[in-house]
Amino acid sequence: MRIRVINPNTTESMTALIAASARAVAGPGTVVEAVTPAMGPASIESHYDEALAVPGILQAIASAPEADGFVLACFGDPGLDAARELAVGPVVGIAEAAMHAATLVGRGFSVVTTLSRTRGRAHDLAGRYVGAGACRGVHACDIPVLDLERDPGVLDRVVEVARAALDRDDSDVIVLGCAGMADLCARASAELGVPVIDGVAAATVLVQSLVALGVRTSKRGEYAPPPAKPYTGPLTGFGITSG
Protein backbone atom coordinates (compact mmCIF):
# COMPACT_ATOMS: atom_id res chain seq x y z
CA MET A 1 0.00 0.00 0.00
CA ARG A 2 1.28 3.46 -0.90
CA ILE A 3 -0.04 6.60 0.82
CA ARG A 4 0.96 10.03 -0.42
CA VAL A 5 0.95 12.61 2.38
CA ILE A 6 0.79 16.13 0.97
CA ASN A 7 2.08 19.09 2.93
CA PRO A 8 0.03 21.87 1.29
CA ASN A 9 2.67 24.51 2.06
CA THR A 10 6.10 24.68 0.46
CA THR A 11 8.29 24.47 3.58
CA GLU A 12 10.43 21.34 3.27
CA SER A 13 11.28 21.12 6.97
CA MET A 14 7.58 20.88 7.79
CA THR A 15 7.18 18.14 5.19
CA ALA A 16 9.91 16.19 7.02
CA LEU A 17 8.09 16.61 10.35
CA ILE A 18 4.81 15.49 8.79
CA ALA A 19 6.52 12.48 7.21
CA ALA A 20 7.87 11.37 10.58
CA SER A 21 4.43 11.56 12.18
CA ALA A 22 2.80 9.58 9.35
CA ARG A 23 5.50 6.91 9.19
CA ALA A 24 5.35 6.37 12.95
CA VAL A 25 1.82 4.96 12.61
CA ALA A 26 2.05 3.30 9.20
CA GLY A 27 1.56 -0.45 9.31
CA PRO A 28 3.81 -3.12 7.83
CA GLY A 29 3.75 -2.97 4.05
CA THR A 30 2.55 0.64 3.98
CA VAL A 31 4.85 3.07 2.19
CA VAL A 32 4.39 6.71 3.19
CA GLU A 33 5.54 9.24 0.61
CA ALA A 34 5.50 12.79 1.98
CA VAL A 35 5.66 15.51 -0.66
CA THR A 36 5.98 19.27 -0.89
CA PRO A 37 4.02 20.96 -3.71
CA ALA A 38 5.89 22.66 -6.51
CA MET A 39 3.87 25.83 -5.94
CA GLY A 40 2.06 27.56 -3.12
CA PRO A 41 2.59 29.58 0.07
CA ALA A 42 5.36 28.97 2.60
CA SER A 43 2.70 28.55 5.30
CA ILE A 44 -1.09 28.58 5.39
CA GLU A 45 -2.57 31.13 7.77
CA SER A 46 -5.40 32.77 5.82
CA HIS A 47 -8.17 32.05 3.33
CA TYR A 48 -5.91 33.60 0.67
CA ASP A 49 -3.14 31.14 1.52
CA GLU A 50 -5.58 28.25 1.43
CA ALA A 51 -6.93 29.23 -1.99
CA LEU A 52 -3.47 29.52 -3.51
CA ALA A 53 -2.35 26.23 -1.98
CA VAL A 54 -5.01 24.23 -3.83
CA PRO A 55 -3.37 24.11 -7.32
CA GLY A 56 -0.20 22.65 -5.79
CA ILE A 57 -2.25 20.08 -3.87
CA LEU A 58 -4.12 18.99 -6.99
CA GLN A 59 -0.88 18.76 -8.96
CA ALA A 60 0.58 16.53 -6.22
CA ILE A 61 -2.45 14.24 -6.53
CA ALA A 62 -2.52 14.15 -10.32
CA SER A 63 1.19 13.27 -10.46
CA ALA A 64 0.74 10.14 -8.31
CA PRO A 65 -1.73 7.83 -10.07
CA GLU A 66 -0.02 4.89 -8.37
CA ALA A 67 -0.91 6.09 -4.85
CA ASP A 68 -3.61 4.12 -3.04
CA GLY A 69 -4.71 7.07 -0.91
CA PHE A 70 -3.86 10.61 0.13
CA VAL A 71 -3.58 12.70 3.29
CA LEU A 72 -3.96 16.49 3.14
CA ALA A 73 -1.71 17.70 5.96
CA CYS A 74 -3.06 21.17 6.71
CA PHE A 75 -5.66 21.75 9.40
CA GLY A 76 -7.80 23.91 7.12
CA ASP A 77 -8.26 20.86 4.85
CA PRO A 78 -7.78 23.09 1.78
CA GLY A 79 -9.09 21.73 -1.50
CA LEU A 80 -10.41 18.53 0.08
CA ASP A 81 -13.52 18.26 -2.09
CA ALA A 82 -11.60 19.04 -5.28
CA ALA A 83 -8.98 16.46 -4.31
CA ARG A 84 -11.69 13.83 -3.92
CA GLU A 85 -13.01 14.59 -7.39
CA LEU A 86 -9.53 14.10 -8.82
CA ALA A 87 -8.29 11.08 -6.85
CA VAL A 88 -9.52 7.53 -7.19
CA GLY A 89 -8.36 6.38 -3.77
CA PRO A 90 -9.56 7.92 -0.50
CA VAL A 91 -8.45 11.43 0.45
CA VAL A 92 -8.62 12.48 4.10
CA GLY A 93 -7.90 15.87 5.64
CA ILE A 94 -6.16 16.10 9.00
CA ALA A 95 -8.82 18.28 10.64
CA GLU A 96 -11.48 15.82 9.50
CA ALA A 97 -9.55 12.83 10.84
CA ALA A 98 -8.56 14.45 14.13
CA MET A 99 -12.07 15.65 14.93
CA HIS A 100 -13.63 12.29 14.17
CA ALA A 101 -10.98 10.51 16.25
CA ALA A 102 -11.57 12.88 19.17
CA THR A 103 -15.26 11.99 19.28
CA LEU A 104 -14.34 8.32 19.75
CA VAL A 105 -12.37 8.92 22.95
CA GLY A 106 -14.27 11.72 24.67
CA ARG A 107 -17.60 13.53 24.87
CA GLY A 108 -16.17 16.84 23.74
CA PHE A 109 -12.90 18.24 22.44
CA SER A 110 -11.08 21.55 22.26
CA VAL A 111 -8.87 22.61 19.36
CA VAL A 112 -5.56 24.38 20.01
CA THR A 113 -4.44 26.13 16.84
CA THR A 114 -1.84 28.67 15.76
CA LEU A 115 -3.14 32.17 14.99
CA SER A 116 -6.42 33.63 16.22
CA ARG A 117 -7.46 34.49 12.68
CA THR A 118 -7.71 30.77 11.82
CA ARG A 119 -10.21 29.97 14.59
CA GLY A 120 -13.25 30.64 12.39
CA ARG A 121 -12.13 28.10 9.81
CA ALA A 122 -11.73 25.44 12.51
CA HIS A 123 -15.23 26.19 13.81
CA ASP A 124 -16.60 25.88 10.25
CA LEU A 125 -14.96 22.49 9.77
CA ALA A 126 -16.20 21.22 13.13
CA GLY A 127 -19.73 22.15 12.05
CA ARG A 128 -19.29 20.05 8.94
CA TYR A 129 -17.51 17.05 10.44
CA VAL A 130 -18.91 16.36 13.90
CA GLY A 131 -22.16 16.58 15.81
CA ALA A 132 -23.34 19.72 17.57
CA GLY A 133 -21.56 20.20 20.86
CA ALA A 134 -18.64 17.89 20.08
CA CYS A 135 -16.25 20.78 19.47
CA ARG A 136 -16.40 22.76 22.70
CA GLY A 137 -14.00 25.52 21.66
CA VAL A 138 -11.13 26.63 19.42
CA HIS A 139 -8.19 28.39 21.06
CA ALA A 140 -5.11 30.03 19.55
CA CYS A 141 -1.60 29.93 20.96
CA ASP A 142 -0.78 32.85 18.62
CA ILE A 143 2.44 31.34 17.32
CA PRO A 144 2.90 31.63 13.53
CA VAL A 145 3.14 28.32 11.70
CA LEU A 146 6.78 28.75 10.67
CA ASP A 147 7.78 29.60 14.24
CA LEU A 148 6.51 26.26 15.58
CA GLU A 149 9.80 24.56 14.77
CA ARG A 150 11.97 27.52 15.83
CA ASP A 151 10.43 28.65 19.11
CA PRO A 152 11.77 26.59 22.07
CA GLY A 153 8.72 27.58 24.13
CA VAL A 154 6.15 26.05 21.78
CA LEU A 155 5.35 22.99 23.87
CA ASP A 156 4.91 25.01 27.04
CA ARG A 157 2.65 27.49 25.27
CA VAL A 158 0.50 24.81 23.63
CA VAL A 159 0.13 22.97 26.96
CA GLU A 160 -0.75 26.22 28.72
CA VAL A 161 -3.48 27.05 26.20
CA ALA A 162 -4.73 23.45 26.15
CA ARG A 163 -4.96 23.22 29.94
CA ALA A 164 -7.00 26.41 30.09
CA ALA A 165 -9.20 25.14 27.23
CA LEU A 166 -9.96 21.87 29.02
CA ASP A 167 -11.20 23.80 32.05
CA ARG A 168 -13.03 26.53 30.17
CA ASP A 169 -14.74 24.21 27.69
CA ASP A 170 -15.26 21.25 30.02
CA SER A 171 -13.72 19.09 27.29
CA ASP A 172 -12.04 15.68 27.49
CA VAL A 173 -9.72 15.71 24.47
CA ILE A 174 -7.35 18.16 22.77
CA VAL A 175 -7.04 18.34 19.00
CA LEU A 176 -3.86 19.96 17.69
CA GLY A 177 -4.88 22.47 15.05
CA CYS A 178 -1.80 22.47 12.83
CA ALA A 179 0.29 19.82 11.08
CA GLY A 180 3.36 21.65 12.38
CA MET A 181 2.37 20.61 15.92
CA ALA A 182 2.52 16.88 15.12
CA ASP A 183 5.70 16.28 17.09
CA LEU A 184 4.16 17.79 20.25
CA CYS A 185 1.37 15.21 20.54
CA ALA A 186 2.84 12.61 22.92
CA ARG A 187 4.55 15.15 25.18
CA ALA A 188 1.44 17.34 25.40
CA SER A 189 -0.71 14.32 26.25
CA ALA A 190 1.70 13.31 29.02
CA GLU A 191 1.62 16.83 30.47
CA LEU A 192 -2.17 17.18 30.28
CA GLY A 193 -3.26 13.68 31.21
CA VAL A 194 -5.86 13.53 28.40
CA PRO A 195 -5.82 12.25 24.81
CA VAL A 196 -4.15 14.69 22.41
CA ILE A 197 -4.90 14.03 18.75
CA ASP A 198 -2.47 14.77 15.93
CA GLY A 199 -4.40 14.89 12.68
CA VAL A 200 -1.47 13.74 10.53
CA ALA A 201 -1.25 10.43 12.38
CA ALA A 202 -5.04 10.08 12.57
CA ALA A 203 -5.50 10.73 8.85
CA THR A 204 -2.72 8.32 7.90
CA VAL A 205 -4.28 5.51 9.92
CA LEU A 206 -7.74 6.30 8.53
CA VAL A 207 -6.57 6.27 4.89
CA GLN A 208 -4.67 3.07 5.55
CA SER A 209 -7.82 1.48 7.01
CA LEU A 210 -10.03 2.57 4.10
CA VAL A 211 -7.57 1.15 1.59
CA ALA A 212 -7.36 -2.11 3.57
CA LEU A 213 -11.16 -2.29 3.47
CA GLY A 214 -11.09 -1.87 -0.30
CA VAL A 215 -13.06 1.40 -0.06
CA ARG A 216 -12.51 4.15 -2.60
CA THR A 217 -14.05 7.58 -3.10
CA SER A 218 -17.47 7.24 -4.68
CA LYS A 219 -17.55 8.54 -8.23
CA ARG A 220 -21.31 8.86 -8.31
CA GLY A 221 -22.57 12.42 -8.01
CA GLU A 222 -20.55 15.18 -6.40
CA TYR A 223 -17.18 13.40 -6.38
CA ALA A 224 -17.37 12.26 -10.00
CA PRO A 225 -14.39 13.43 -12.08
CA PRO A 226 -14.61 17.12 -13.03
CA PRO A 227 -16.22 17.87 -16.43
CA ALA A 228 -13.74 18.15 -19.27
CA LYS A 229 -12.91 21.73 -20.24
CA PRO A 230 -9.89 23.89 -21.04
CA TYR A 231 -8.29 26.27 -18.56
CA THR A 232 -6.31 29.34 -19.58
CA GLY A 233 -3.38 31.42 -18.38
CA PRO A 234 -1.23 29.98 -15.59
CA LEU A 235 -3.87 27.25 -15.08
CA THR A 236 -3.60 25.86 -18.62
CA GLY A 237 -2.00 22.66 -17.35
CA PHE A 238 -4.98 22.00 -15.07
CA GLY A 239 -7.48 21.59 -17.91
CA ILE A 240 -9.43 18.31 -17.90
CA THR A 241 -9.26 16.42 -21.18
CA SER A 242 -11.65 13.58 -20.28
CA GLY A 243 -14.14 12.71 -17.53
Image: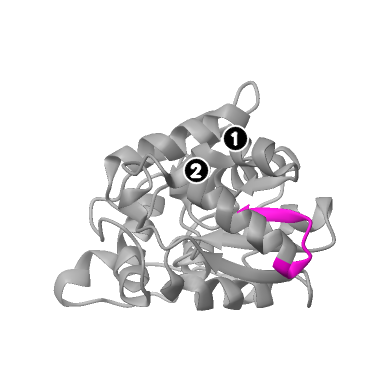
Q: Amino acid at mark 2?
A: Leu
Looking at this view, is 101 or 180 the one in front?
Answer: 180
Tag 1, which secondary structure? helix
Q: Quadrant of residue 17?
A: top left
Q: Which residues are magenta?
A: 168-175
First in sequence: mark 1 vs mark 2: 2
Where is mark 2, residue-wise?
155
Tell me where residue 124 appears, x and y as whole percent: 59, 78
* Residue at figure coordinates x 37%, y 69% from the top left: 50
Check residue 187 in the rendering and tell me which mark sits there, or answer none: 1
* Residue at the limit of the structure toward the top, as seen here: 28
Residue 170 within the magenta-colored segment of the rendering: yes
Q: CA distance from mark 1 to mark 2?
A: 8 Å
Q: Amino acid at mark 1?
A: Arg
Q: Quadrant of the N terminus?
A: top right
Q: Quadrant of residue 52?
A: bottom left
65 left or right of 163?
Answer: left
Assess whether mark 2 and mark 1 are in contact (beta carbons under 8 angstroms). yes
Is residue 92 among what the camera can see?
no
Looking at this view, is 24 or 186 the one in front?
Answer: 186
Question: How many circles with numbers are drawn on the protein?
Answer: 2
Tell me where residue 41 appears, x and y as whole percent: 26, 60
Tell me where residue 107 appears, x and y as whole percent: 85, 61
Tell me where residue 232 appears, x and y as whole percent: 19, 77
Check residue 112 in the rendering and tell me which mark sits there, or answer none: none
- Mark 2 surroundings within 10 Å by alpha-carbon count, few (fewer than 14), some (14 through 19), many (20 or more): some
Tag 2, which secondary structure? helix
Is residue 202 among what the camera can see?
yes
* Residue at figure coordinates x 69%, y 44% from the top left: 192
Q: Is residue 3 above or below residue 162?
A: above
* Residue at figure coordinates x 64%, y 21% from the top left: 28
Residue 51 within the magenta-colored segment of the rendering: no
